[in-house]
Amino acid sequence: MSENVAPIDDTTALEVVGLTPDALSGLDLAELRETRDGAVRTETGLSYLRRLVQAPLDMVRGELERRAAGHPGDLATLVDDLPRILSEHSGSGSGRQPQTLEPTEVDPELSAELEAITEGGMRIAMLPTATDDELVELSGRLDELERRVSRRRRTLHRCIDVLNGELARRYGSGELTVEGALAETGRDAGD
């Protein structure tokens, strides 16, 4: 999916963690790191959720393509075609690799919405018997959910970049040194 997306400004990005650009300099090192690490955890959950949305979306689109090509759909054909369908988006995305593949937190509201749209996966199992209109409607709802999840991810990416930029600024200005950061990390770990 190649679409033009508007850049996310620092103020909007920091709002997701309850900060403003002016508040960054007031955070101590531990607060800054914890805020960044929390944003990374949230982004990892959204990345996982996006993959959960993308799989059924790709399956619905695959069924629509089969029908458009004049091939009748059945469950066996859908299952046989899954490797091709699901591999189409591997390697696409923002290019940012998650630090961990296992999410520790997944947005419960968005996850519940996916569950409702797919009826716990039952709508996906019924793709070959769905009408074209039902498939188009399902595709539209999944696509809209995927766009919202992707937008939140992009906002978190920008937030993480801003927080990392503040860390880099502190190191660059001499306000923070590697030795001082290591000493503070050691104190935090001993608590």
Image (cartoon, rainbow, N blue to C red):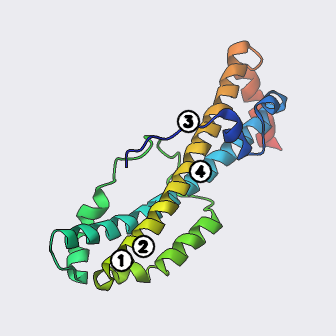
User: CB atoms at circles 3 and 2 under 8 Å apart?
Assistant: no
- Left or right: 52 with respect to 185? left
Residue ID at (54%, 77%) = 116
Q: CA distance from mark 1 to mark 2?
A: 6 Å
- The disc placed on residue 7 is 3
The percent position of residue 38, horizontal first and vertical second, equals: 69, 48
User: CB atoms at circles 1 and 2 under 8 Å apart?
Assistant: yes
Question: How busy is the neighbourhood of tag 4: few (under 14 within 10 Å), some, or many (20 plus)?
Answer: some
Instruction: Find numbered disc 3 in the image and state the secondary structure of the residue it sits on.
Output: loop
- Residue type, numbered disc 3: Pro
Q: CA distance from mark 1 to mark 3?
A: 34 Å
> Which residue is under mark 4?
152
The percent position of residue 1, horizontal first and vertical second, equals: 37, 49
In the displayed orientation, state which residue is furthest to the left: 70
**Sequence-wise first label, 1 or 3:** 3
Q: Nearer the viewer, residue 25 or 167?
A: 25
- Residue type, numbered disc 1: Asp
User: CB atoms at circles 2 and 4 under 8 Å apart?
Assistant: no
User: CB atoms at circles 1 and 3 under 8 Å apart?
Assistant: no
Instruction: Find numbered disc 1 in the image and state the secondary structure of the residue it sits on.
Output: helix
**Sequence-wise first label, 3 or 2:** 3
- Residue type, numbered disc 4: Arg
User: Considering only vertical position in the picture, is 80 above or below 178?
Assistant: below
- The disc placed on residue 137 is 2
User: CB atoms at circles 4 and 3 under 8 Å apart?
Assistant: no
Question: How busy is the neighbourhood of tag 1: few (under 14 within 10 Å), some, or many (20 plus)?
Answer: few
- Residue type, numbered disc 2: Glu
The quadrant of the image that shows the C terminus is: top right
Across the whole image, how many numbered discs are drawn on residues?
A: 4
Task: For residue 186, say whether it is visible.
Answer: no
Q: Nearer the viewer, mark 1 or mark 3?
A: 1
